[in-house]
Image (cartoon, helix red, strand yellow):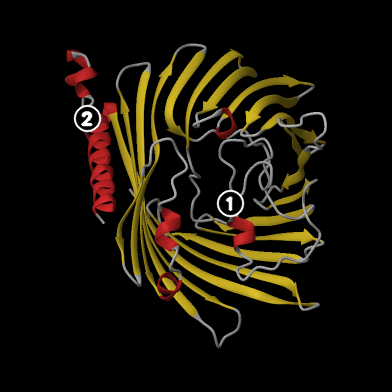
Amino acid sequence: MEKSSLTKSNKMRFYLLCFLLFSFSFPFFSQEDKKNKWKEKVEFSGFIKYMNTTSFVNLDSLITDNLIHNRIRFKAYLSDKITSVIEMRNRLFYGQATRLNSFLASSLENDKGIVDMSYVSLDRKSLVIHSILDRAYMRYSDEKWELTLGRQRINWGVNLAFNPNDLFNAYSLVDFDYQERPGADAVRFQYYTNELSSFETAIQFGKSLDSSVIAGLWKINKWEYDFQFLIANFYSDFVLGTAWAGNLKKAGFKTELSFFQPKNNFLESSGVLSLSSSLDYSFKKGTYINGSVLYNSSGTSQALNSSNLFQTFIGDISAKSLMPSKWTYFGQVSGVFNPALNGSLSFFYMHGINLALFMPSIVYNFNDDWELMLTAQSAFANINSNFSSAGSGLFIRMMYSF
């Protein structure tokens, strides 16, 4: 108990230190800067959301849960070239699902970064409060290059649904309530050779080479296509990858692939190919369609034996294993009904596993600050040789942005 208490005390000291460092950065400003208004050197924003969730397999097994979700963003311009950013995600879970998930608190505290920035401040039967710093970095920007140090989002993917090139921050579209995506504790250097080409390298440090990601990315534009090429040490694998984005007539065409070769027994081992490709099209009246496919050479075609099939979509994914199936298909159609109302319908289908997920969504914007979203997720799977419902979730979310 004493060790746990000490750990929590250290985390609270860490949060306080971060707040002081970023909030009171003004000693770095010149005397002339200090005369300027606060808002010219500091940006403070965020949101607070309430979401009610009702999940069920059938109408006789309704389980409800509630989530209060707050995000705080703080950016300080220390000079014309130096920017500091810190963002905190705070969530309060309460309800039946929280009470039934005895591992919720421990799973939330699992911070994979170098510095443990995750903190569960309260863990009760039906109530869990969790906070995490998922952005905490400083950036130096010059005319042709940038250097970023700290917890940051490094997005190298080009596709909407599946991103084999996203080595640092793989994510799933099913986790719709986390648009910002996780950050990585990394050092990132970007050099811009011109407006359409650049080179960058990034290092996510671990305790050893096999727990680290060290990668380089080269971007160019040729034949009206954007190309990128990457080489990386990805934990215990050596990686080569590429991607492109352009148009086939009026439709968007994007492809990205990465090949993961184990470093141990390099010549004897067979690697893993992760490849995704998509076509998308935007109509004049605001309707958008997207069709994507993902190939995972190490994927399975066998039915999954899982009590919670939703975790298949949002579990511990990586660029090497974005989905467990060998072939996964994604489709989405979205549209704007009027300036305040828009909607979409998305679906995933895992071939062989015979697992499908449908996600309809409607969003209404009252004004620039208030938003109401209604979303559903309904899974169907091959259970006991019958394709039937594997569970559904209904989500009602109100968000206020500031």
Query: For residue 38, which numbered disc appears in the image?
Result: 2
Q: Toward the viewer: 45 or 288?
A: 45
Q: Amino acid at mark 2?
A: Trp
| Depth order, front residue of 89/160 | 89
Amino acid marked by disc 1: Asp
Disc ID at residue 112: none
**Residue 52 sits in which quadrant?**
bottom left
Identify the mark nearer the N-term, 2 or 1: 2
Q: Residue at x 65, y 68 (%)?
A: 306
Residue named by callout 1: 316
Q: Is residue 88 above or below residue 396?
A: above
In the displayed structure image, the side of residue 239 where residue 201 appears, left or right: left
Q: Which class describes the residues within 10 Å of circle 2: few (<14), some (14-19), or many (20+)?
A: few
Q: Is residue 115 above or below residue 110?
A: above
Residue under the point 71% across and 48% down: 283
Question: How many callouts does the rendering have?
Answer: 2
Q: Quadrant of residue 241?
A: top right
| 164 in relation to 52, above or below | above
Q: Residues within 10 Å of mark 1 (few under 14, many from 20)?
A: few
